[in-house]
Amino acid sequence: MIRAVHIEDEPRNIELLKSLVSTHCAEMVTIIGNARNVKDAIALIKDIQPQLVYLDIELNQGNAFEMLEELGEINFEVIFITAFNDYAVKAFRINAIDYLLKPISIVELKEATAKAVYKINHVGTGNQNLIKALKNIKADFGAHKIGLPVSDGILFINSEEIIRINAKGSYTIIYLVNNKKITCPKNLKFLEQMLPETFFLRVHHSWIINLKYLKKYYRGKNGYMEMEDGSTVAVSIRKKGKFLHYLPE
């Protein structure tokens, strides 16, 4: 029996996958643990040494990419779980990375699990090329369109057109070039994991900026920045160190 863990930050999704696996994949896999954030996920994986990880991309206080990069050595198979995003799905397919779309299909769950179990039993666990592939996927996001859920469907925009993003409770306002803006019914964390760190930086619990459009940084205890569109964005104390890393001495 293959030992698996599930990394997911929503309790109801944890219970759902556990139920689906125990009902439809019980002869192949057993889920023996779960974690809801990057720190706990790393500790769980190091402690249990699973052969398979069901890994949601969005996590509390981070994302799947950060978790895998921090782990370094990957001696297990990974099945990613993601909300719909056209380019992300295409990128996973190109790089032969297993994934499940939310809401999870029973057929796709069984197929992905069976594929992972076969690889574990006949090839061995681990994929040292996985992190490299994920870094390429993240970097490529900056040069491609991303799908944004909106009230009447999904709007595809070039990520390079985004100047800044502002959290407004459970939704966000996305400010684009040419004074355009979009209201997206997703939180800031959802957008943060979609955008490449090469260009986008979260500088506040309410703000993500595109570094391409940063015009000036004003130093001081309450430091803030001016963007090319004339707007100003605050830098939180917690995020200040990471932001200053991008600036010249």
Image: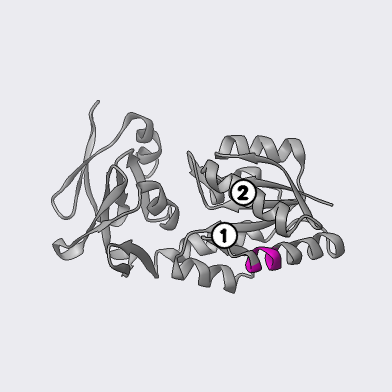
Judge whether residue 24 is colored magenta. no
Colour style of the rendered protein structure: one colour
Disc count in the image?
A: 2
**Front-most of residues 57 and 28:** 28
Q: Which residue is mark 2?
A: 68
Judge whether residue 108 is colored magenta. yes
Q: CA distance from mark 1 to mark 2?
A: 9 Å
The magenta-colored residue range is: 107-112
> Could you tell me the amino acid type at mark 2?
Leu
Residue 32, by quadrant, is top right
**Residue drawn at point x = 46 percent, y = 70 percent:** 87
The answer to whether 88 is drawn above or below residue 6 in the figure is below
**Residue drawn at point x = 40 percent, y = 40 percent:** 245
* Label 2: element kind: helix
Q: What is the magenta segment's predominant secondary structure?
A: helix
Q: Which circle marks residue 36 in the picture?
A: none
Residue 248 % position (x, y): 34, 43
Q: Which circle marks residue 134 in the picture?
A: 1
Residue 109, by quadrant, is bottom right
Residue 56 % position (x, y): 56, 52
Q: Does residue 42 appear anywhere in the picture?
A: yes
Apparent side of residue 137 relative to residue 171 in the rendered image (left or right)? right
Residue 40 % position (x, y): 61, 35
Residue 7 % position (x, y): 61, 45
Q: Does residue 248 appear anywhere in the picture?
A: no
User: Mark 1 touching mark 2, by CB under 8 A?
Assistant: yes
Name the residue furthest front: 23
Q: Quadrant of the C terminus?
A: top left
> Could you tell me the amino acid type at mark 1?
Leu
